[in-house]
Image (spheres, rainbow, N blue to C red):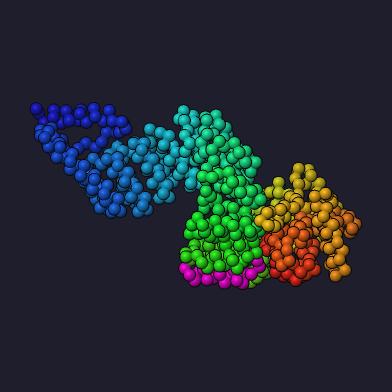
Amino acid sequence: MHYKEILMACFNVISHLNSHSPHRLLPPKPKPARLICSLALNPSSTTTITSANSNNNNRIQSLCKQGNLNQALQLLSAEPNPTQLTYELLLLSCTRQHSLSDAYTVHSHLADNGFDQDPFLATKLINMYYELDSIDHVRQVFDKTRDRTIYVWNALFRSLTLAGHGEEVLDLYRRMNRTGISSDRFTYTYVLKACVASNCSSPLLNHGKEIHAHILRHGYDASVYVMTTLVDMYARFGCVTYASVVFEEMAVKNVVSWSAMIACYARNEMPFEAVELFREMMIQTCDTYPNSVTMVSVLQACAALAALEQGKLLHAYILRKGLDSILPVISALVVMYAKCGKLELGQRVFDQMEKRDVVSWNSLISSYGVHGYGEKAIQIFEEMINQGVSPSPISLISVLGACSHAGLVEEGKRLFKSMQRDHKMRPGVEHYACMVDLLGRANRLDEAAKIIEDMRIEPGPRVWGSLLGSCRIHCNVELAERASKRLFELEPSNAGNYVLLADVYAEANMWDEVKRVKKLLEARGLQKIPGRSWIEVKRKIHSFVSVDEFNQPFEELQALLIELCSEMKEKGYMPQTKVVLYDLDEKEKERIVLGHSEKLAVAFGLINTSKGETIRITKNLRLCEDCHSFTKFISKFANKEILVRDINRFHHFRDGVCSCGDYL
């Protein structure tokens, strides 16, 4: 047979085999003519060559598993027929070595051999480029892949979602639906997560609701994984009611489902419900045990409620189940003890940690900060740096917050300047908010306003909110109006901003302006968040809501408060009725402030705790000046130690003195 005829016959055989390939690959690069001729002229040699190829592939795979990527790549350049598994392991090795240059080499070799159209390897390429922080290459691989299976789409959705490109994922999801490819449970999981992987909240929530409808329509409401992700999505948007309905309707719940709902309550300022759901989980599910995620959420809820006894029980459970080696759990324990008023126990837990990360240090710094021990918080911050732990942005927020609570203005300014100089960290909105709060509380409002003017980034609600809060403390009407104007634009539905402005007007006796703000609240359909306080007595949590009128459930407590108030007035207590936003006579104002939730909780604690037992209360709002003054008097008058943690800080009342030094 003539040489050219032999060559054409070989190409025909290769083309025939390739057309029947399950992956429908592109034609591979032609083998050298000398090798093709030898195969055609000497068929018996094929076994030897196939065996050699197999050995080469095995060696490359073995080197990849051993971590010898460079040697594997050297062999790859001499291997004419790498297998799918060989390429898979090479891509995995590039990820493990975090080598983008080697990834390009493997990708180029893979494309030259026609494997870039293998859907399986396309998913591996997408995953690899995501892990190597090259999202542009993720998109390129997807765009060049013609056979886009659901697995290829899912790999793309996962990468873009984890990289924070939520809106892009949702656009692509609609595009996929138009092609007729059916979603699976992984698709729904990724696109639901994409809804919260963006700063644009409202439109993406609507997308989430649409996906919820798709899930129901296609029967995926039976998937515990999909429905758990749905619970988490609603939780992150603050849609607690939606999350609760989805959770309750789940036919099957696992530990992740329970944890997601507990976290939903804890994250959305419903700690009482979080603790109650945890108790329900322990009772109802004999074969479901809480994991580290569950414990972190329920510890956060106990911290929010100052539920020390509940927290101690959880600590015992953590030790019994061996969860004390998990850093997030131990860090949550440190915070829980600190927020329950047992700072020394939190310090002891921290001291017993075998290893600590920056989160652990941040927990301790914030713990001392919330108690008003600013200098100690700074000391711990510096100790962390000396031990070689680099501070995170949260570290600076924690230590700046500690300076604010303790009035350490110059120390706070020094730390703020050190962010860029020493730690190469650009201040964010939260850091500026801390500085505005620090200066504002110290009545250096002009400096606080100057910081906002000089900001290189857009001041958000937190920054303007800090300024407005400081204006309320020092009754600066002009700056309060300026701050509230911006807040009404940024947060038109936040009733708290209107209330703070009304507080400023009330203290300045500008009652017409108070009425104007109230009418604005009503016109926008907003309501002031009611004050709510919690107290733990005999391992049971009791809740109280502020009331303007006496009512039957609190009759005994209000009778005690009236009696105590009368007796304390003789000892010098003067009700601070300026906190009442009504133009009423003094007696009416006194009656209203007597119905504040923290006073009801104090009265309940006096009745239901034994001698020498500390009263622990937590409140969802800031402690008002009258309740602060009242509780100071009570601590001395009734010889009782009282701990109150409000939304800002910790107040430790003993013998007529508060740990905050009246620095509210």
Magenta region includes residue 372: yes
Magenta segment, prevailing SS (helix, strand or loop) = helix
> Left or right: 250 with respect to 55?
right
Report the side of 548 relative to 71 (left or right): right
The picture places residue 441, in percent across and down from the top left corner, at: 71, 65
Q: Is residue 538 magenta?
A: no
Q: How many marks?
A: 0
Whether residue 387 is visible: yes
Nearest the eye: 139 or 205: 205
> Horizontal and vertical percent for residue 24?
31, 31
Front-most of 111 and 320?
320
Which residue is rendered at x = 76% and y = 43% of the image? 524
Provide residue 205's location: percent of width, then percent of height.
60, 40
Q: Is residue 399 visible?
A: no
Q: Residue at x 59, y 57 (%)?
A: 313
- State the residue in front, 241 or 150: 241
What segment is highlighted magenta in the picture? 370-388
Instruction: Name the image quarter holding the N terminus.
Output: top left
**Looking at the image, which residue is at 81% across and 56% down?**
557
Tell me which residue sits at (79%, 44%) in the image.
522
Q: Quadrant of residue 138?
A: top left
Picture coordinates of residue 490 (x, y %)?
67, 49
Image quarter where the C terminus lies is bottom right
The vertical placement of 493 against 392, above or below, is above
